Amino acid sequence: MIPIVAGLAALSAGALALTKGRRRLALSRAKHPSLGGHVRMARRIAGQIPYFAYDEDRFFAVDGVDGSVADRRRDGFARLGHLYAERFAKTLALTREASARLSDLQFTGAYRVPFPFCARVREALGTGAFLTRSDGPWVEDVDGNRLIDLTGSYGVNLFGHEAYKAMIAEGAATAAALGPVLGSYHPVVADNVRRLATLSGMDEVSFHMSGTEAVMQAVRLARYHTGRDRIVRFAGAYHGWWGEVQPGIGNPVSADRTLTLADLSERTLAVLAGRRDIACVLVNPLQALHLNRPAPSDGQLTDSGRAAGADLAAYRDWLHRLAGTCRAAGVVLIFDEVFVGFRLAPGGAAAYFGVRPDMVTYGKTLGGGLPVGVLAGGAALMKRYRDDRPADICFARGTFNAHPYVMGAMDAFLRRLEKPETQALYEGLDARWDARAAAFNAALAAAEVPVRTAHLQSIWTILYTRPAAYNWMLQYYLRAEGLALSWVGTGRLIFSLDIDDTLFAEIVRRFVAAGRAMAADGWWDVPVGVTDRSLRRAMLRQALSVRLGRG
């Protein structure tokens, strides 16, 4: 009898091990093959890359060009440095002063370009961080320079600076009599709740102080109601800076309950359908522009390997299939629209793609220019307690949730969104931005500048069409032409909808001028045989040499 029992136990253990092995293999195959899909490996590798800086000669000839080309680059770099020092003197001085004690500036300043070039670039081409006023799509720095704003205020600026100044003023007037009284609600909150429920198609909403907080609460509620621990995000997607949705590089804590899977993958759908420990799936619709890749930044531009491009039909079909799989598996589908928000359509990305998620988070532009986070969902998922177990709650609060001034500005935004003139802005939006992107690409091609764009409506990424190690220099030529970019440089341009065709044509003209100037200075002149792969390998060899103490 004992041998039989032992045999059955061994068979059971073997079957369990086989099942676990199959699950582990299925999960591994559902990850994207890049480091973005293997977050632990990415973090280990990042921790092994040593700092090094190119010396004078290497700085201008890292791609192996001859001395004459290196001299053109050196002269162009010096000329640009003199221009910056003269044109942006006060702005740069204030930035340097503040940076000594402002850690945010230290971080963004250090990651505008690839780190081996950073020290020299910061010294000669420092980028001012201060602005004094805005005027429509224009901004003005401390020196009085007027620049066309392509930063989009991290996505906040959808309708234009003047619209948000008006909404903030209107919101402040609405809340002025109550002031910053917290805990109780200003009556305008009831109006916001009604409008948001209608807009999102959800039963209930809750207010938070940032988009990151709204996503945190959505995940917490999904876990609370499903009784499951794991969450799924897609490779490269950003959902705020808290630990469990930002595993890998940039996150010093473990995120063992997070599965990072591949977008547009049958294997991902199989994992979602086959597991019973997944509470929710997070979708950032911005990933339609750069599937399975992180947000692009010029700090990563060591070659011309940046890729982007939106196949909206394929992405729409994927989202519908993903939603069906989640419903069948009892997994909560959360649309994180904090960044994209109401940029694609008045009803948000869910309306644009025709998908109904279980929960949706908003932020950015919804606050009318002030900081906010909103979570909307079905009543059953939004409930934070159990009627039959009063001590079993899902707690979430915050001192500044539903701040009267923020709620006033939000009400102004939601009312503006409903106006006929605002609705008219959305008519033909895809066709308008497709035409603008085509015109942009045609102009750069005609000028023989190796620059193109990929876009998701008014959200653009600049691509480079031939191997080069110095594409990150374009941001500095663009600023010299009066275009303001964010700290990620050409990785992300965000246009406001108040940019008309005339101003857009001027933006294209300035891009062409910047590209021609950069080409004339030799930054895109590379020796025959240089490839993106050879550029990457050269940097890897340098890092390895330093790591081994030979560099």
Image: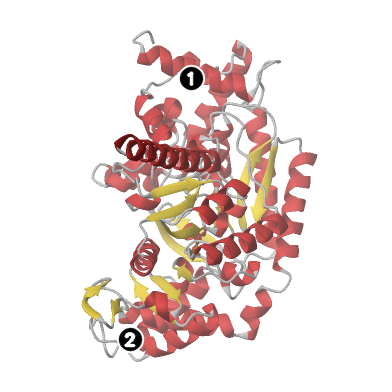
Q: As shown in the figure, which amino acid type bears the numbered disc 2?
A: Ala
User: Does 499 sit above or below residue 302?
Assistant: below
**Which residue does the image show at 64% across and 40% down from the upper left?**
463
Q: Which residue is mark 2?
A: 175
Measured as percent of width and height from the top left, residue 352 is found at: 64, 69
Who comes first in sequence, dot 2 or dot 1?
A: 2
Q: Kindly identify which residue carries mark 1.
A: 540
Instruction: Tell me where residue 531 sits by quadrant.
Output: top right
Q: Residues within 10 Å of mark 2 (few under 14, many from 20)?
A: many
Residue at 46 percent of width and 42 percent of height: 19
Q: Where does the image place residue 347, in percent across and percent down from the top left? A: 58, 75
Q: Secondary structure at mark 1?
A: helix
- Return the x and y of residue 325 as percentages of the image width and height: 58, 61
User: Is residue 147 visible to us here?
Assistant: no
Q: Residues within 10 Å of mark 1 (few under 14, many from 20)?
A: few
Q: Secondary structure at mark 2?
A: helix
